């Protein structure tokens, strides 16, 4: 069970991860952390880097605007991945 809540103060999506600035409900400290893109829109549990309490953070979804920005790149990546899958399976 999580003892604290990490509130996302601001966030930014990059090609590789989600960079979030969070506030710990236990120690009130602000810290930044990077999350896997797979965790988009999910609740994730981790330790506060400041006070080490276990807490939960609700990660944001990418906005439509942010999605468009990466659309071209994502298409290319997906095609490459599909080729790899075809060979492997
Ligand atoms: Zn804390």
Image: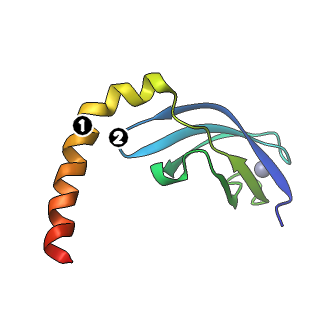
Q: Residue furthest bottom?
A: 89
Residue 62: x and y in percent read 51, 34
Q: Is residue 56 above or below residue 41?
A: below
Mark 1 crowd level (few <14, some 14–19, many ≥20, 10 Å Cα):
few
Does the CB distance between marks 2 and 1 fall below 8 Å?
yes
Q: Nearer the viewer, residue 46 or 26?
A: 46
The residue shown at (52%, 28%) is 63
Q: Is residue 80 above or below residue 71?
A: below
Task: Tell me which label, 2 or 1, sits earlier in the chain.
Answer: 2
- Screen quadrant of the N terminus: bottom right
**Residue beneath disc 2:** 15
Residue 88: x and y in percent read 18, 76
Under circle 2, the secondary element is: loop
Mark 2 crowd level (few <14, some 14–19, many ≥20, 10 Å Cα):
few
The residue shown at (54%, 46%) is 40
Q: Is residue 86 left or right of residue 32?
A: left
**Residue beneath disc 1:** 73
- Screen quadrant of the C terminus: bottom left
Q: Is residue 89 left or right of residue 58?
A: left
Foreground: disc 2 or disc 1: 1
The residue shown at (24%, 41%) is 75
């Amino acid at each position: 069970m999580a003892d604290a809540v990490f509130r996302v103060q601001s966030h930014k999506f990059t090609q590789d991860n989600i960079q979030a600035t969070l506030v710990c409900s236990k120690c009130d400290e602000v810290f930044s952390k990077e999350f896997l893109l797979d965790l988009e829109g999910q609740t994730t549990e981790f330790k506060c880097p400041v006070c080490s309490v276990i807490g939960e953070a609700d990660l944001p979804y990418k906005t439509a605007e942010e999605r468009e920005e990466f659309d071209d790149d994502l298409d290319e990546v997906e095609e490459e991945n599909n080729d790899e899958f075809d060979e492997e399976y």
